[in-house]
Image: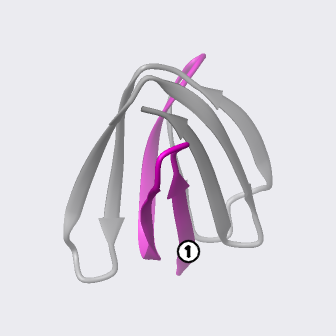
Amino acid sequence: MLNLEIISPEKRMFTGIIQLVKLPGTLGSFEIMENHAPIISTLTKGKIKVKEVDGTITFFDITGGLIEASNNQINVLVEK
């Protein structure tokens, strides 16, 4: 499983254990699943899709940001 944190300048938007996250990368959308290779990327305007362990799917609208993922820990810093 993956540990995800999504943080905006105003608040912590999401913290939890997930199955996968789909992100709006600057060069196109991409997904991160368990044991993904380490990555740092910029994000553009779009939606972050989070699939939680229980199957719940949640969407977050963002205007841009950064992602860093390594060792099943994903940190997303977003502009709102």
On the picture, is 38 further left or further right than 26? right
Q: Is residue 25 above or below residue 3?
A: above
Q: Which residue shows up at 59% across the image and 31% down it?
A: 65
List x then y, in percent, for residue 57. Answer: 21, 61
Give the magenta part as a residue range: 1-28
List x then y, in percent, for residue 51. Answer: 32, 64
Q: Is residue 79 above or below residue 45?
A: below
On the picture, is 55 further left or further right than 13? left
List x then y, in percent, for residue 34. Answer: 58, 70
State which quarter of the image contains the C terminus. Answer: top left
Task: Report which quarter residue 63 is drawn in.
Answer: top left
List x then y, in percent, for residue 29. Answer: 47, 29
Label 1: state its secondary structure: strand
Residue 69 belongs to the span the image colors magenta: no
Figure label count: 1
Q: Which residue shows up at 19% across the image and 70% down it?
A: 56
| Residue bearing mark 1 | 2
Q: Which residue shows up at 43% across the image and 73% down it?
A: 18
Tag 1: amino acid: Leu
